[in-house]
Image (cartoon, grey):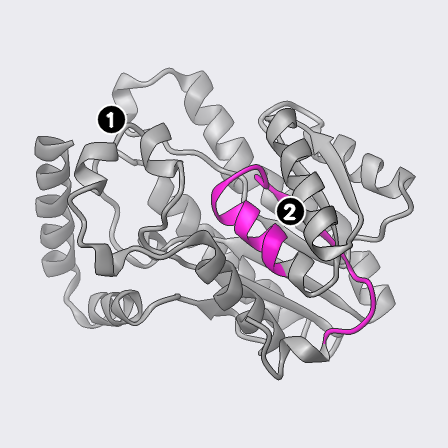
């Protein structure tokens, strides 16, 4: 997507994408590369980062920087930012995308897994945002895109116990930063996709139940990324890609809490029986 708003983006901007080896992160890397921006890619799987970097350089003539990292490890955010700084790359656009799912019930999982989940999906996006924001403000330009989820607009559900709450936090966090950065040249946006054609559902062990979702409700990672980039340039604090998901979010805002919780409870029972 290259519309009148994204056309305003000028110069060889530098983008840092977390969780860039697949899915939505890869989609953002590809969409920003189409705009001619240099891309710093970080994820755990170095071989996938290398393959993506070669593809972006060959197809779009941009420069890339590969930073293999496990963001659940202590100090990982600093190591990523130090690598970018040593390369002389200012982080002008940050896409906080890294994440994974835990589908077991909260009491049935190891605390280490839950701790890593909170680190990657909550602590690291906040830390990275905090550390790159001053430079963005000083330069008078910056974009922070936090990948949330439609689940952040819905009541909590069994199974993915912490997933919805962390995404709700990212939405509210983005809204707060959006307000704080008004007039600075920095835009902060939470992107809230629904079902996206990526590895998330396989990794979360929900492949079978996700496969029962109608095709019309699925989006590609690049579609989500294009929506997100457009929303960031339009200075939107929150974007829900896709008409069906916009309607879903709006509907749940109107429903009484007991009704919406009952709907989500029924949905989680259906998912557990089919997945």
Pointer 1 with pointer 2, Cβ within 8 A:
no
Q: Is 200 drawn above or below residue 179 in the view shown?
A: above
User: Does label 1 or label 2 sit earlier along the sequence?
Assistant: 2
Q: Is 38 drawn above or below residue 48 in the view shown?
A: below
Identify the residue at image location x=60%, y=74%.
Answer: 2
For the residue labelled by badge 2, is the local secondary structure a helix, a strand or a loop? strand
Rendered location of residue 169, percent (x, y):
46, 51
Asked whether, in this view, residue 42 is left or right of residue 61, the answer is left
- Residue 17 seen in the figure: yes
Asked whether, in this view, residue 186 is left or right of residue 70, the answer is right
Q: Is residue 141 magenta?
A: no
The magenta span reads 9-31
Asked whether, in this view, residue 261 is left or right of residue 135, the answer is left
The N terminus, quarter of image: bottom right
Please identify, in this view, whether the residue under mark 1 or under mark 2 is nearer the observer. Answer: 2
Rendered location of residue 76, percent (x, y):
69, 29
- Report the disc number at residue 17: 2
Residue sitting nearer the eye, 41 or 246 = 41
* Number of residue marks: 2
- Report the disc number at residue 175: none
Q: Which residue is mark 1?
A: 105
Residue sitting nearer the eye, 226 or 72 = 226
């Amino acid at each position: 997507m290259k519309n009148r708003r994204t056309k305003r983006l000028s110069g060889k901007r530098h983008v840092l994408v977390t969780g860039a080896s697949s899915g939505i992160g890869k989609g953002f890397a590809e969409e920003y590369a189409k705009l001619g921006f240099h891309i710093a890619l970080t994820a755990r799987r170095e071989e996938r980062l290398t393959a993506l970097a070669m593809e972006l350089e060959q197809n779009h003539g941009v420069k890339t920087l590969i930073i293999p990292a496990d963001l659940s490890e202590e100090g990982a955010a600093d190591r990523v930012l130090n690598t970018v700084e040593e390369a002389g790359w200012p982080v002008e656009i940050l896409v906080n995308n890294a994440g994974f799912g835990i589908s077991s019930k909260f009491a049935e999982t190891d605390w280490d897994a839950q701790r890593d989940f909170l680190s990657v999906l909550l602590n690291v996006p906040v830390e990275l945002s905090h550390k790159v924001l001053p430079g963005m403000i000083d330069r008078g330009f910056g974009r922070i895109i936090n990948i949330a989820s439609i689940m952040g607009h819905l009541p909590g559900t069994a199974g993915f116990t912490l997933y919805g709450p962390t995404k709700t936090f990212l939405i509210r966090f983005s809204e707060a930063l959006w307000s704080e950065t008004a007039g600075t040249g920095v835009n902060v946006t939470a992107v809230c996709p629904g079902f996206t054609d990526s590895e998330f559902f396989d990794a979360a062990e929900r492949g079978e139940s996700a496969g029962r979702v109608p095709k019309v409700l699925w989006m590609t990672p690049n579609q989500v990324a294009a929506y997100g980039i457009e929303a960031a340039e339009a200075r939107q604090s929150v974007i829900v890609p896709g008409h069906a998901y916009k309607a879903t979010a709006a509907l749940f805002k109107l429903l009484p809490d007991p009704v919406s919780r009952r709907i989500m409870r029924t949905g989680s029972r259906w998912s557990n029986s089919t997945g």
